[in-house]
Image (tube, helix red, strand yellow):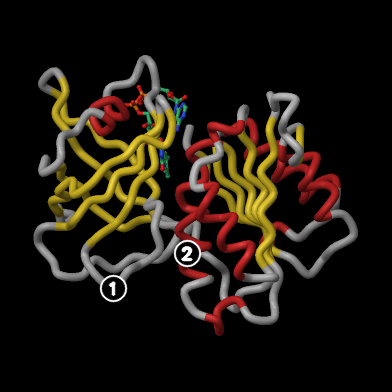
């Protein structure tokens, strides 16, 4: 069966860093675009006479209208990521979706979110969904361990810091692998902080997103080293 193709029109964009952009699209055909936080869409474009398709995680929770955000970085040798980062406001891109099973388990349990770089996209969507309604998060604890190189790379830092101030059950742990001397937060790679939080716990779920190496490292840490059940560890890989 043919998949339904939609048109996404770029409504707004801003730089999150030199190489990373936050884009907001509107779906032209529908007043409301439904998806589950954590899912992705498949975008299509012509390049040198060939149709290319690339997956992008939706970086916002469902808003009850036809908008969604993406968070993406330029890949040096790639076409699609640069094509999207260079889009002018009002430009249109075809896509199908939503797709994917990287969504929050039901019932929701206390959870660790683990992301590096643009891997924050589906995790931001999940966190926006969770904290949009008290009944979704009340009685549980949530930790976001967000790994980046430098302080400038901590995308959405203001949003997560504000959430942590407003909700005692949300803990934001940005960790830097190349922190400057002035950085007083966590240092090192995400897995060191995951290990410290996850050891001895069997009552949590984990949601991990980023590039392959980081995802495999943390999945193996939780399942093989710490003995977590497989079904408690959900992950999405970008490469
Ligand atoms: C389910 C899913 C969701 C995704 N969501 C996002 C997202 O929210 N944001 C996003 O930026 N990308 C995301 N990606 C990656 C995206 O689909 C493309 O692979 C990426 O934009 C590169 O495409 P390209 O055509 O520019 O380069 P290509 O020529 O297709 O890729 C070149 C190489 O870049 C590497 N690569 C892929 N993604 C990244 C990345 N994010 N950072 C660094 N290197 C990468 C891969 O090793 C790949 O082989 C997702 C991928 C999948 C499978």
Residue lying furthest right in this view? 200
Residue for badge 1: 64
Q: Is residue 37 visible?
A: yes
Report the front residue among 111 and 158. Answer: 158
Residue 230 lies, with reference to residue 166, above or below; the image says above
Q: Earlier in the sequence, mark 1 or mark 2?
A: 1
From mark 1 to mark 2, how far is it between C-alphas?
Answer: 13 Å
Where does label 2 land, which residue? 128
Q: Which mark is residue 169?
A: none
Q: Quadrant of residue 192?
A: top right
Q: Does mark 1's beta carbon lie closer than 8 Å to ligand 1?
A: no
* Front-lying residue, 154 or 77: 154
Q: Is residue 19 left or right of residue 186?
A: left
Residue at 54% from the left image edge and 47% from the top image edge = 157
Quadrant in the picture for residue 184: top right
Seen from the viewer's position, the closer of residues 82 and 222 is: 82
Residue 177, x across and y down, in percent: 70, 28
User: Where residue 195 appears, x then y in whole percent?
Assistant: 82, 47
Kind of element beneath mark 1: loop
Position of 156 compared to 199: left or right? left
- Mark 2: few, some, or many residues within 10 Å (few <14, many ≥20)? many
């Amino acid at each position: 069966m043919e998949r339904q193709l939609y048109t996404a029109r770029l409504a707004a964009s801003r730089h999150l860093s030199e190489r990373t952009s936050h884009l907001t699209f509107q779906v032209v055909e529908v007043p409301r675009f439904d998806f589950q936080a954590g899912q992705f869409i498949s975008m299509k474009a012509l390049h040198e006479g060939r149709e290319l398709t690339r997956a992008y995680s939706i970086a916002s929770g469902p808003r009850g209208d036809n908008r969604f955000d993406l968070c993406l970085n330029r890949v040096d040798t790639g076409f699609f990521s640069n094509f999207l980062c260079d889009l002018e406001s009002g430009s249109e891109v075809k896509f199908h979706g939503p797709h994917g099973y990287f969504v929050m388990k039901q019932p929701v349990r206390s959870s660790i979110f683990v992301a590096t770089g643009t891997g924050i996209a589906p995790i931001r969507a999940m966190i926006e969904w969770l904290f949009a309604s008290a009944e979704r998060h009340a009685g549980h604890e949530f930790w976001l361990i967000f790994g980046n190189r430098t302080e400038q790379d901590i995308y959405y830092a203001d949003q997560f810091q504000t959430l942590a101030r407003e909700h005692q059950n949300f803990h934001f742990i940005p960790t830097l692998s190349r922190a400057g001397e002035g950085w007083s937060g966590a240092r090192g790679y995400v897995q060191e902080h995951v290990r410290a939080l996850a050891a001895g716990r069997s009552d949590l779920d984990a949601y991990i997103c980023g590039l392959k190496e980081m995802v495999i490292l943390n999945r193996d840490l939780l399942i093989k080293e710490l003995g977590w059940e497989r079904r408690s560890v959900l992950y999405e890989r970008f490469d």
